[in-house]
Amino acid sequence: MGQVDFGQENDDNRAIYKEDESFLKLPDGEIKREIASFSIKASNKLKNFQKAKVNEIPLKKCSDSFAFFEKGNIYASEIIVSIEIENTSSKSKIAYIQYLHYKYGFDLPDSVIKDIYDPIFCHSYTKSNKPIASDCKVFRSEDERRVYIYMLNGQGDRRYEVTWVIQDDRYYGRVIDVVN
């Protein structure tokens, strides 16, 4: 006898991921050192791990349903990251993540965002309704070759973090861990 799964939705509102997508399974190298500078899992598990400096891309706008990050000047936007959610019945999940670098851009593949539930964008605003705190961040490596899109999602004991890695303007992979 076997068990058959016909693509049921994730009733848990937890990301479904493989063990090898964990931060602890990343090979030692620049990507691991850079993610360690902002990852909760890394700071909880690897106290003395050598971290590499990354630069944060400013959050420009956000709400309960989107986040928008932009780095540039008055003449041109250098990097833009846009994330939006969709609500399905009682759940919210990522609808798309768009990455733009100057004039080149792409949406992250559906296969790496379709299982990301319960995203949390802005949770603190100024009196003029400008975002000042978010569980979603974007970082860029010092050598400007890698961009990291980071989200802390879920609630209570069901919190998890996910980081999508873009290297040399191409989607490289994701790192996803439960936060304990």
Image (tube, rainbow, N blue to C red):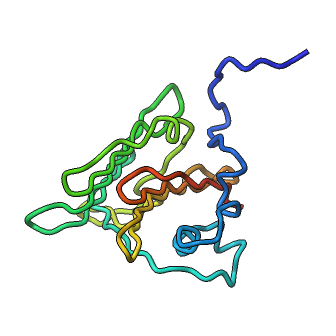
Looking at the image, is 107 positioned above or below residue 125? Answer: above
Q: Residue furthest right?
A: 1
Q: Position of residue 11 (x, y in %)?
A: 66, 31
Looking at the image, is 54 positioned above or below residue 61? Answer: below
Quarter in which the C terminus is drawn: bottom right
Q: Residue furthest left?
A: 75
Q: Image point 35% across, 55% down: which residue?
A: 169
Residue in front for this viewpoint, 148 or 63: 148
Q: Image point 38% across, 68% down: which residue?
A: 140
Q: Is residue 123 left or right of residue 32?
A: left
Looking at the image, is 117 positioned above or below residue 100? Answer: above
Q: Image point 44% across, 61% down: which residue?
A: 148
The image shows a total of numbered marks equal to 0
Q: Residue furthest top?
A: 1
Q: Image point 46% across, 40% down: which residue?
A: 94
Q: Position of residue 58 (x, y in %)?
A: 31, 67
Q: Position of residue 83 (x, y in %)?
A: 37, 47
Residue 74 appears in which quarter of the rendering? Answer: bottom left
Residue 61 appears in which quarter of the rendering? Answer: bottom left
Q: Is residue 104 left or right of residue 95?
A: left
Q: Position of residue 45 (x, y in %)?
A: 72, 72
Quarter in which the N terminus is drawn: top right
